[in-house]
Amino acid sequence: MSDLLSEENSKTGALPPELILGYRYLLKQRLGQGGMGAVYLAYDQRLDIDCAIKEMSTALLKTEEERERARKSFHEEAKLLARLNHPNLPRVTDHFSDHGREYLVMEFVPGETLATILRNSPPPWPVADVVAFAEPLTEVLHYLHSRTPPIIFRDLKPANIMRTPEGQVKLIDFGIARLFKPGQSQDTQAFGTMGYSAPEQYGTGQTDARSDVYALGVLLHQLMTGHDPIAQPFNVPLAHTINAAVPEAISSVLMTAMSHDPQTRFASMVALRRALSNASQHSADVYVAQRPGTAALPNVGYAPSAQMRPTSQPYGPPSSQPYGQTGSQPYGKPSSQPYGQPSSQPYGQTSSQPYGPPVAQPYAQPYSPPPPPTYAQPFSPPAPPMHPATHHLQAASVPKAKTTGVAQTAQIMGFLSLLLTISGFFYEDMGRDAGIFMGFFGGFAGFVSLIVSIVAISLKATRESIKGRSQSVRGLIFATVAMVLACVVFAIIGAANQY
Ligand SMILES: Nc1ncnc2c1ncn2[C@@H]1O[C@H](COP(=O)(O)OP(=O)(O)OP(=O)(O)O)[C@@H](O)[C@H]1O
């Protein structure tokens, strides 16, 4: 034991269960192991709750000066992280040093990493689910970018995103471990994962919010197409050329996000989110066409599905990450491990492994590469985010004419009835009888369009189409106003008649 904790021992992740760290945290099991450190599930004896503890060692750093600098930066960054408060980030609650190692204590996030989810439910996922999944990510990244000073995540990838059984998404790795990697402590030096990280992270360029925009673009592209970004970093084909179910408008948004030149990317998460939302609204009819056939992972964005519920683990809350399959890659190096293949360096293959043998990962649905992509337009200047003419490319087979047709009729009828009723107000010019006729006819037409609007809203396909929904609601409003105005016209004409 003393050997495991000796300051010379650079190995992390070897602490046994039942060990008490910092006079407070009872170790339960190891959750993951990366290049620079390990993460444990522990029990906080003071607060009576589970927590996750990240362990990092300074032993790889050569000089005492470097080690001291890393320790100092670690405690400074830990304090910065402790000030963060966002539902999509685990709370950082403590940090301490013990036997030459540094520890960061944070909220334990039950559930699975996106890397694990992808192995069990390989992409492509339904476009609408990916857009829903992107929402909390854009929110939390915007939160980080709007801190003072801004926090750039810089290593957004499936292994650093967790999803709780309730469907909540959390970013888990702030890259604090880079401080313990020789030569990686400066912002200007390479830090990230090849394939996901923006080109400027590997050159002399300074990273900013747009570097995270790039990584999110890559991730969403992977979820919508199944294309492995690690295979050919910085050369991602247009999403709709790999998966025809991706509307061109969304494909174009992703291309803008993944532009090589940060200047031509979306400037912020807010801009990316807005563009995605616009593109998906305009493609709403396309979604209706896609969803029945492509629901590979229903409700992946928020609601827990049986597929994603963690299996029970010997120690308390579940970890679906078997030992040795961290899914994370050393920073700055291209990965040689595509998703869906087990790690080539599993822990626990020897009997001396403190945590027992590794759990076999069920690779029931191994990653199958997408059809050979066409690199027809790799990184040509991004097209404008929306192409209205192409939004209906996939919609030929949708019962669109019927559904949005009803909604459209409701809207037009409602509007006409409103015009008729309003013209009743001009009875003095038209004559009393014409005014009564307009009021009566407008009110009656309003009543009919009210019924048509209610029918439109009750149709499932209309409800699923954003355009259909808004048309029916407009029809409903026009019709109601027309009926109310018709009553007003009668009242006015009636009153004028008495005098
Ligand atoms: N707060 C947390 N709650 C639950 N599990 C966590 C938490 N943080 C990390 N984990 C688990 O530990 C694994 C490794 O975590 P993390 O990504 O922070 O370390 P790493 O891959 O070693 O990172 P680094 O890139 O910093 O070396 C994750 O894949 C996840 O399964």
Image (tube, helix red, strand yellow):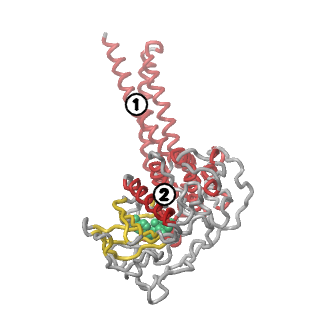
Q: Residue at x 39, y 52 (%)?
A: 84
Label 1: which residue?
481
Q: Work out whether 101 lies above or below 139.
A: below
Name the residue nearer the viewer: 255 or 437.
255
Name the residue nearer the viewer: 374 or 438.
374
**Residue 498, horizontal then vertical, whole percent:** 31, 12
Tag 1 secondary structure: helix
* Residue 197 at least partly seen: yes
Name the residue nearer the viewer: 86 or 276.
86
Farthest residue in the front direction? 64
Question: Which class describes the residues within 10 Å of circle 1: few (<14), some (14-19), or many (20+)?
Answer: some
Query: How many labels, in total?
Result: 2
Q: Which tag is nearer the camera, tag 1 or tag 2?
A: 2
Label 2: which residue?
133
* Residue 405 at least partly seen: no
Q: Work out whether 42 lies above or below 245.
A: below
Q: Residue at x 38, y 55 (%)?
A: 79
Report which quarter residue 246 is drawn in: bottom right
Farthest residue in the top direction? 499
**Residue 330, horizontal then vertical, whole percent:** 56, 68
Q: Residue at x 42, y 41 (%)?
A: 451
Question: Which class describes the residues within 10 Å of circle 2: few (<14), some (14-19), or many (20+)?
Answer: many
Type of amino acid under label 2: Phe
Q: CA distance from mark 1 to mark 2?
A: 39 Å
Q: Is residue 198 left or right of residue 5?
A: right
Type of amino acid under label 1: Val
Report which quarter residue 488 is drawn in: top left
